[in-house]
Amino acid sequence: MSRRWSARELLELVLDAGSFESWDEPIDVTGHPEHYRTQLLAAAEKAGTDESVLTGRGLVRGRPVAVVVNEFGFLAGSIGTDAARRIESAVRRATAERLPVLASTSSGGTRMQEGTVAFVRMVEISRALMEHRAAGLAYLVHLRHPTTGGVYASWGSLGHVTVAEPGALVGFLGPKVYEALHGEAFPEGVQSAENLAAKGVIDAVVAAEELPGLVDLALGVLVDEPTEPRLAGRVAVTSVEELPDEQRTAWESIEVTRRADRPGVRELLRYAGAGTVRLRGTDEGERDAAMLVALTRLDGQPCVLVGQDRERQSESSPMGPGALREARRAMSLAEELGLPLVTVVDTPGAELSVSAEERAIAGEIARCIATLTTMTVPTVSVILGQGCGGGALALVPARETVAVENAWLSPLPPEGASVIVHGDTDHAAELAEAQHVRARDLLATGTVGHLVPEPLDCTPEELAVGVAVEVARLIRTQRR
């Protein structure tokens, strides 16, 4: 378990020195019953705060943010009506001032001393936050130990990016309450930050000491304006005639994309991404490592990137419905925050199994296509390697599509298509040629509009930079 930080200590840790400005009005407890008023005064003396939350604004590495921070020492960080009004007021002020909100929770939930009247205020907090998000403003959440009950089930679970501190207990029902109600202990480890990250409920486990760095990176994408291009990459072409005479057959290109050392989306981020923040899972309890989602900058252009990770796909772990739901999370995030979306296609195909069918693989492909084709922000798709089947098509239909010279796109693996047409796999290479799957063919037919050349001596870094330069150029063009 990491150190338990008080609200004031966390503000000092995360915000730039001397930058905090409180937005809190004094709390008047005279209207409460005497026994409860006594509890509130004792809690204030113990915690050193007048309520269970502190709000205000400050700077994180020079960027202005609004902050909402729980104080667990005040009646276990519980949220009563006064605390709820304080949170609502801060969120609405942040919306009016166009500020991102950073919330750090540590609470047992709704204040039982106030009962239903406090309980229903969680709705108003959530309403204010959704209006904040609807205004295209970022909401970042840091869950501290412990975060349970109504806090976790409202403003603790509405972030665009959500992380928790190491070892934090995070759950809807407190384990002590569960044990009292059911006569047995809640299974150990289920409500840990680490387990929730593994299950795709939260994005990462991040210590409080690391929070300023994370906020800095996230806001660098979510808030900062695009910068001028700085990378110098291979110039993409828009017609086959512009390509060098060097030719590869369709099958040769397919073999290139299947090599173990073939660069994928990870290399694209490693060599050409800047200020990258990885997001993991659907935030609804599902995670598939076959899909990579990140906030990043490509040659100065902030964007949400979602890509099929070739390193995490195999016959034993194919890309399933959860991966496509992660992709839709990325699409929704980009649309809500007004950020360009970049999709990266590199898959041998979606999962074919009973489980995939029952978890709506076809429906998720359809919903990805439908979402991507109706987005209003700039969108660019990159066919980086293998582009096989509906799993690939789910990420293709952006406003602009770029292909790498050896990339390909087909309704089935060539071997599978050969079986359907010829009854065997022996004609795979011949059929790949006949189906015009190569990037050159896709460019000639207008399926893709831009092709990044990939000569035989092209290094992974050169390929990544070439793709990033072209993607950034197309984003700038769409922004105009």
Image (spheres, helix red, strand yellow):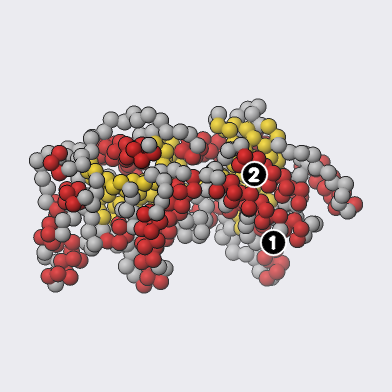
Could you tell me how far apart the alpha carbons at marks 1 and 2 are, in whole angstroms?
32 Å
Query: Does residue 181 lie above or below 169 as drawn?
Result: below
Q: Residue at x 27, y 49 (%)?
A: 383
Q: Nearer the viewer, mark 1 or mark 2?
A: 2
Q: Name which residue type carries label 1.
A: Lys
Q: In the figure, 174 relative to 230: above or below?
A: below
Three-letter amino acid code at disc 2?
Val
Q: Is residue 309 visible?
A: no
Residue drawn at (19%, 48%), measured in percent from left and top?
A: 443
Residue plotted at (47% across, 60% down): 286
Q: Quadrant of residue 415?
A: bottom left
Label 2 crowd bin: few (<14), some (14–19), many (20+), radius 10 Å: many
Q: Which mark is residue 176?
A: 1
Q: Position of residue 46 (x, y in %)?
A: 80, 42
Give the residue furthest to the front: 480
Report which residue position mark 2 lands on.
91
Element marked by disc 1: helix
Residue 48 horizontal side relative to residue 373, left or right:
right
Residue at (27, 45) in percent of width and height: 402
In the rendered image, residue 117, in percent from the top left (x then y), is placed at 76, 58
